[in-house]
Image (tube, rainbow, N blue to C red):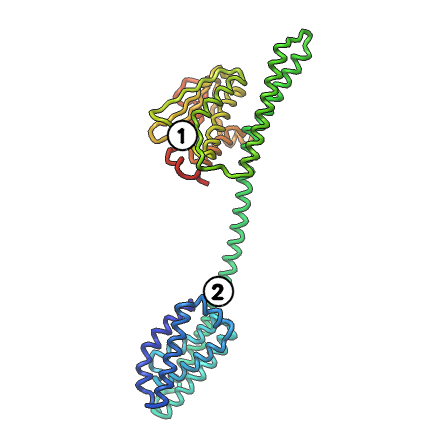
Amino acid sequence: MCRQVFGFRLAMIALAAPAALLNATPGLATRLVGAAVVVTFMGSYVLFRDWERFGPLLLRHPTLLAVDTLFGALLLIAAGPDTTLAYVSVCTPLLAGIVYGWRGAACFASLQGLILLLVHATLEDQHRQPGLAQSLLLPGLCVIAGAVGSSLRNLMLRFGAATQALTTVQSRLAVTEAVGAERARLAREMHDSVAKTLHGVALAADGLAGSAGADRMDPALVKQQAELVARSVRRAAAEARELLADLRRESDPDHGTDVLVELAARTRDFSARTGLAATYRPTGDHAVPPVPPAVARQLLTIASEAMENAHRHACATHVDVRAGVHGDLLRISVHDDGRGLPPGTTLEQLRRAGHFGLVGMVERAASVGARIRIGRGGHPKGTEVRLELPLAALTAPPPA
């Protein structure tokens, strides 16, 4: 705002300078008026161009504005109050109000008003024509301009304080949302990896304890169950290490993951671990491009969660896993022949009931910009989890 006022001053001084030089008495008076033109014009130009640099200097030294006012008075006496320099005189208390507050506005409005009254008194001796109302018009405008400048200063300060408070609140909300998002992510990771594997370890350990305490213990069965417990414990330890590594470092975006190979390996491991028949078949017209590790982790975790749900809740006898590129989409499908979801099931109902598996799958899909559909699909029975990710998303970071 101060820069705009100085720009207006520049234009008014440039318009009134010829009249001031022509009306000045030849000799010393002309030199003084010329010096006043240069000083006021260059001072206004410097502050207009580099206000951020020289504005604090003007703020610390009000005498600079007072000196500018005196040079402007010299121009005003030479050119007369009926030129554009009258607007320059009104700008001075306006600037004082903006920069120094109401005290500065009162001081400079009084100084500028006194100068204008002296100028009019000089004109009265020469022309004997200006009336009282005309003599008081510009001093009155100076008072009004000073009040306006002071009011604008208070308004801007209050607006700045409100903006700062709003920024603080927004920062706190952003931190709160970030903490909430991280807590939700950790909850999904714990549910879908370590907690699930430990649950399997507990079931396997119960089976081992029952076999070892039987009247007729089968050594082969006990050995098989002990090996299952050992494998499950190692898997839980590996998942915990992987989760901790993700918390400590960022995934390398340049190292892509072959999702089809990883999905096939997870399907084989699931079938061997649970005894539920699971088959994997690649589909699509061409190969799947490398997937960033952060995205691949979410996709594979969703597929693994779908297979685990089929084993635990669906009473399924077979799980069919398919993946491939169809058009511009990477599609992953996990279908089981179980009993399917109850009619009318919603994510809100599952969340209230404490079943966070499907809720976590939807959140994971949204975190990488994928579409997920959970239902019967085109099959006569069972449940299909279909995940579709645009290939364009593989070349850019996942959306926040």
Identify the residue shown where x is 54% and y is 20%: 312
Q: Marks 1 and 2, how far apart in space? A: 53 Å
Find residue 388 and name its label.
1
Q: Residues within 10 Å of mark 2 (few under 14, many from 20)?
A: few
Q: Nearer the viewer, residue 46 or 249?
A: 249
Disc nearest the viewer among 1 and 2: 1
Q: Quadrant of residue 375?
A: top left
Disc 1 marks a residue whose amino acid type is: Glu
Judge whether residue 29 can be spotted in this image: yes
Secondary element at image label 1: strand
Q: Give residue 238's position: percent from left, percent from top.
A: 57, 28
Secondary element at image label 2: helix
Find residue 155 and name its label.
2
Identify the residue shown where x is 58% and y is 21%: 231
On the rendered image, what quadrant is the N terminus found in?
bottom left
Please, which residue is most extreme toward the front here?
A: 255
Judge whether residue 354 can be spotted in this image: no
